[in-house]
Image: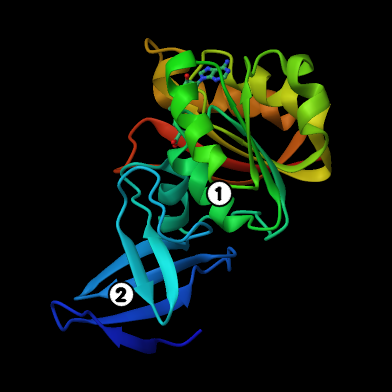
Amino acid sequence: MPAKFVKTHILTNIPIRITAHTPAHIPNVFFLEEGGNTRLVTKNLTPNIQVYGEKLITVDGIEYRLWSHHRSKLAGMIEKGMNLPFREDSRVLYLGAASGTTASHVSDIVENGRVFAVEFSPRTMRDLINVCSHRSNMVPIFADAGKPGSYKAIAGSVDVIYQDVAQPNQAEIALINAREFLKEGGYLVMVIKARSVDSTVNPKIVYEQELDKLGKEFNLLDKKVLRPYHPDHLAVIAQKT
Ligand SMILES: C[S@@+](CC[C@H](N)C(=O)[O-])C[C@H]1O[C@@H](n2cnc3c(N)ncnc32)[C@H](O)[C@@H]1O
């Protein structure tokens, strides 16, 4: 979409523009231009409600939430131009939701879908439940992502698995969840954290080993190191064969 003048900031007089959908046309994700800065935002599914103190900006009657690539690896993937396979009605299994920071932006994106948010830390789970209580398309699941049988009855089949668990057996966790929940032709979006798999080995070797494991059941579509936002993290997009 071409640059569209929308309004002038009420205090600073700086013009704010919604410049474009992201290159991959991810639903409800935009670049917002303000005072020479271009920043990633999602359209807020729950107007007037902040999740983690993020800035809310209303343009032309629509409220957006700023989404920083420093706080979110998924935002970093979008900034790096990766073609994320979300639709407005996607059912997403989110493994390693923590307190719901990134998961809430996924909830904005798949506004007519579902986000099944799995987390096993009791402390962060409390925050996650609070986030989900405001968002009708989010379902919190207190479970170990390494034991998908324990949430089989809740999640059902999904279009996308997003995984950010920082565990030594990351690839195995992705594979067992994909076998249980992912539709044929569905997508895996995952972040391989080299230091969590083996901190003694060169990250490039760790990435190759993990990709080999995934390659037996997935077609690799894209991969990018998230430097400088998240060093030693490889973002991967793959499709179930
Ligand atoms: C890097 S943080 C996730 C950050 C989150 N994705 C975000 O961007 O807001 C990793 C999270 O995964 C959780 N985790 C790690 N292993 C897990 C497992 N086996 N099952 C469920 N959650 C797990 C941790 O408790 C932690 O909250």
Q: Is residue 29 left or right of residue 18?
A: right
Q: Residue at 55% x, 65% y: name it.
A: 28
SS label for mark 2: strand
Residue 151: horizontal and vertical position, in percent? 75, 21
Q: Is residue 15 left or right of residue 179?
A: left
Residue 221: horizontal and vertical position, in percent? 65, 48
From the viewer's side, name the closer residue of 237 and 42: 42
Vertical placement of residue 60 versus 56, above or below: below
Of labels 2 and 1, earlier in sequence is 2
Residue 158: horizontal and vertical position, in percent? 77, 40
The circle on residue 106 is 1
| Amino acid residing under circle 2 | Glu
Residue 219: horizontal and vertical position, in percent? 73, 41
Vertical placement of residue 210 versus 186, above or below: above
Can you identify the residue that label 2 sits on?
33
Residue at the farthest left position: 12
Q: Residue at 48% x, 34% y: name it.
A: 130
Vertical placement of residue 113 versus 215, above or below: below
> Which quarter of the picture shows residue 215?
top right
Q: Residue at 58% x, 57% y: name it.
A: 109
Q: Residues within 10 Å of mark 1 (few under 14, many from 20)?
A: many
Q: Is mark 1 within 8 Å of ligand 1?
A: no
Q: How many marks?
A: 2
From the viewer's side, name the closer residue of 181 and 197: 181
